[in-house]
Every structure is written in structure tokens, then in C-alpha cells.
Amino acid sequence: MIAIARAFRTKRRVLSPVSLTRFDQQQTTRWHVDGGPDASVLVLGYEPTEVRSEVYVCDLGRVAARLGTDLVDAAMRAQRGECDPWIAELGKRLPLRFDDYPIVVLNNSVDRSGGVLHRARVEAKPSASRVVNSALFALAERAEWGDEAAAFLTANPAP
């Protein structure tokens, strides 16, 4: 995940870590972007699990443009289930096998062009873990790879 983020760069900017976390997700989420700067990228790394789940994405800018509305209204419509034509289940279009280590990279930006909402539908299984490694990166002039990145790389999986 860190190598993917280090590979993203423009002529003047790189991705610098904002937050690096690991958690056991056993609950379905609502549509959201993870909190962070306007220009950010979210990298989600899933560890092998027996927990059945589905990951969905929705291009907020495309929804707003197609519906002739703003981003806030488009996000509210997604919450109400009114954006089905613009929703993709990642496992249906891309191979997203949870018996492996899939990585998902999302435009986490929320600016005038939109961003990508995401959500997970999870069938809770208390006897098993569904570990998600979440790395949020922001555009910066130089990357600040401190102790947090080293700790993230060597951390034990969430219980």
C-alpha cells in the first residue's frame, strides 16, 4: 500500500501520509469519504477473511453532473438509494477476492469535481476478523514519512 502511494506523483507533488490505521470492520457503513484534505487519496488494503462483504463505489461528481445538482445533494441522494445507475460493486467489475489481499485506491477528494463515495456491506461474524488497513494520503510538495508509517508497516493485525 505504501509503495502504491509512493508511485503516485505529479511534476511538483507527491502523496504524503495523513493517517494510517488498521481495524476490524464488522459493520455495514453508509456512503462516505474518509475525513481528510480536499486533495487526497485513500488506499484500502483488505486482509484475508471469512467474513462476507461487498464494497461499493459511487462517483459523486458524475452523479451531480448527471442529475444537474450539487455535490451535497448528490451525496444525500446516494444515502437515500437514488443513485443506483452510478454505483459499482467492486467485486462484480473487478476481481476483489477476500481470501487474498485486495487493495483498493480511491479518489478521496471532495472538491468542485467530486470524489468517490464508498461503502461496505458486511455480514458480521464475531468469530472471525475482517481487517482493513486504511491509508489516507494528501498531495504535498514533499512526503513526510515518519514513525507512523514505520509503525503501520510492522503493526500486528487488529484483533
Image: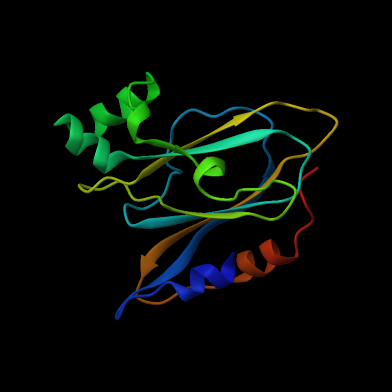
Observer-nearest of 159 and 75: 75
Image x and y of residue 43, in percent: 52, 56
Q: Look at the image and name its color scheme.
A: rainbow
Q: How many marks?
A: 0
Residue visible at 24% across and 27% down? 73
Above/below status of 16 relative to 66: below
Quadrant assignment for the C terminus: top right
User: x and y percent of residue 42 in the render?
Assistant: 48, 54
Q: Is residue 115 above or below residue 53?
A: below
| Residue 44 pos. (x, y %) | 57, 52
Relative to residue 74, is residue 50 drawn left or right? right
Residue farthest along the top direction in this orientation:
80
Report the residue at 43% width, 57% height from top: 41
- In this image, 119 relative to 25: left or right? left
Q: Which quadrant of the structure image shows residue 145?
A: bottom right
- Answer with left or right where residue 129 lies relative to residue 132: right
Quadrant occupied by the N terminus:
bottom right
Most extreme residue toward the right is 127
For this orientation, the residue located farthest to the left is 68
Residue at the image point whose x is 72% and y is 40% from the top: 130
Direction bottom: furthest residue: 11
What residue is at 34 percent from the left and 74 percent from the top?
13
Residue 20 image-quadrant placement: bottom right
Where in the figure is residue 88, as x and y percent of width and height? 44, 38
